[in-house]
Amino acid sequence: MMPFRRYIPLLALLPFVLVPLFVSDTYIVHGVLAKVCIYVIVVAGLDLVSGYSGDISVGHAGLLAVGAYTSAILCWKLQWNWWGTVPVSILFTALAGVLLGVPALRLAGPYLAMTTIAFGLIVQTIVNESEKLTKGSTGITEIPRLRLGSLSLESNNFYYLTFVAMVLVLYLKRQVVFSFWGRAFEALKENPLAAECSGVSRYRFKLGAFIISAAFTGLAGALFIHLNKYCGPLSFSLQFSIDFLIMLILGGTRSMFGNIIGAFIVVFVPDFFNNIAEYQLMIFGGLLLFTLYFLPGGIIGLINLLARSVGALFRRRRDAVVTAATPRTFPGEQLSPVPEVAHQDAATMQLQAVYRRSLPAGTGSSGHEAAAALLKTEELTIAFGGLVAVNKLELDVRPGEVHALIGPNGSGKSTTINMLSGVYRPTGGRIRFADLPLGGAPHNISRAGIARTFQNVALFGDMTLLDNVLVGLHHTFSRITLLDLFTASPRARREERAARARAQLLLEFVGLGDLANERARNLPYGKQRLLEIARALAQNPALVLLDEPAAGCTAGEISAIDKIIGKMKAAGLSILLIEHHMDLVMNVSDRVSVLDFGQKIASGTPAEIQRNERVISAYLGAPADELPPAAAAAV
Ligand code: ADP
Ligand code: MG
């Protein structure tokens, strides 16, 4: 992607800068426009929390108060230069973000909303009560005049200061959301389970978003006290927190211009309708309801929609020519069973180079130790209420082995994979992986080297194929810090480029290279399953758990999956395969274990399993000798 083009929209902010040249009214420039800029800073931060990360904060006025009071108190009590107070305000507010986020974001649900409401109220109470430090309800009026060297930053110049701060914050936000952070937010929002199983820690990113948001708000707080040269508790009411949410939703989430438009409306509307001030709440309530019902994307969503429609009108004539000339092959066309030969070999070689993980001693595939298990379960058990879904399961997968797990529907196969991938917590027994005990959250297990696919395909439907795989490559960014992203460091850009190249290679490996920029939800079902395999491989696993990869696939797609499994094995990967297509199972497996009612009833080579009478009767519900030979052979 061209990094520069991303910033072109920022140029649209230029007219803003020029306003003071035409409008000399201090009230408009200092009182209104500077206010808008400060609010945009808060709303941009709130957008990270609510728009991207999907949590609701009703405490941003409280955070703003932390930033404002930190700066005001340092200026008043310690005679600090205001510029020196800014980093302290940012730091303190970020710390408040940590204190709030750490407990509240561990739990899913409305906890952040509840905690932040309480926080806002507590801040107001503290400010009111600690008279000595904050002058209580009177508020601090000893706010110094702002200068930069010999330049006064009062009146219209203050607007320029807030404008620069706003542009800086919008830039930093863009740097975050156009990085692996942004992909993590989107993945977590679309499918939290799949995101976690791909190695993304939900908690870490939600907390990160909240802390960045708090830091932005701290900056806004330090600026805020100069609007009226005043810092008092009434400015930071619960209503103000709700106003920020209204700005965000009205303008439209996940959009720089949405943030700006929202702040503009909420600042301007009351000013222009002073005579109906009593109805302000009602007007905003009505606007909000209208937006939620009719414009779920906010005003910016409506503008985008209009722009697209107009664009489509202009494009129609050209398109008519293009579609006639080039037949559409997608979606719904038959899968070319395997990728092109040249591609395929390059991709396999790459896969071999990339996926030979160095495993701890004892599980290496060298010499007589080759038979030591990579994965081993001991008496693995899980009960749902009275139902024992998996019962004392003993399973071992050796390095480089394809181990099939088969059994009738409801016999506990998917449940086993859910335990192995950290989605379910076993009620009994142990799992050992690479000679170490295995447990913990799904993203930890992904990092440990176990990747999975899902029986019910779990992709990030609104993201492109390439981005889906890039989420699986999340672990490759572990050394990239926020500072790297903020400064667009060479290291961050290098990692992003490398990940993109690798994602493309993985797509080619499963035969989807041409569709890299298509949205995942537009793929036919069978190709979605291939994409899941690519995302699993991206996690650099030693063991891949495949839950019915061929279910619902066409014959062509099944043969592609057959070949892909063969190549994964050739690259040194171990595979636990759940599958109902017996010809596929018998073709690719080294060993087969059979589950029935949560218990292992047989284990052995494919040939042994095909002859096993308990297996035949479990599958067909009748003793083997009562079956016609053809039916027995089909098992
Ligand atoms: P399969 O072998 O077809 O993959 P599953 O592992 O999905 O079977 O299911 C095994 C049994 O466990 C079924 O009876 C199913 O209803 C039950 N089960 C699976 N997950 C849950 C759950 N979260 N809560 C209750 N019962 C469950
Ligand atoms: Mg299942």
Image (cartoon, rainbow, N blue to C red):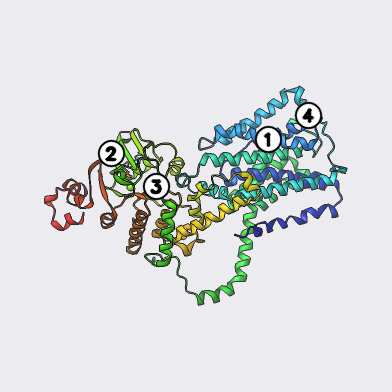
Q: Which sits in the foreground, 418 or 569?
A: 569
Q: Amino acid at mark 4?
A: Gly
Q: Name the element at disc 4.
A: loop
Closer to us: mark 4 or mark 1? 1
- The answer to whether mark 3 is within 8 Å of ligand 2 is no
Which residue matches tag 4? Answer: 139
Which residue matches tag 1? Answer: 91
Label 4 to label 2: alpha-carbon separation: 69 Å
Closer to us: mark 4 or mark 2? 2
Ligand 1: give its quadrant: top left
Mark sitting earlier along the chain (3/4): 4
Which residue matches tag 2? Answer: 394
Q: Name the element at disc 2.
A: strand
Q: Which sits in the foreground, 192 or 179?
A: 179
Q: Percent from the top left, x then y, of residue 614?
A: 18, 45
Mark sitting earlier along the chain (2/1): 1
Closer to us: mark 3 or mark 1? 3
Label 2 to label 1: alpha-carbon separation: 52 Å
Label 2 to label 3: alpha-carbon separation: 20 Å
Which residue matches tag 3? Answer: 542
Would you call the spot at circle 4 few (<14 residues within 10 Å), some (14-19), or many (20 or more)?
many
Q: Is residue 315 above or below residue 133?
A: below
Q: Name the element at disc 3.
A: loop
Residue in the image at 82% along x and 33% along y: 143
Residue in the image at 48% along x and 52% along y: 460
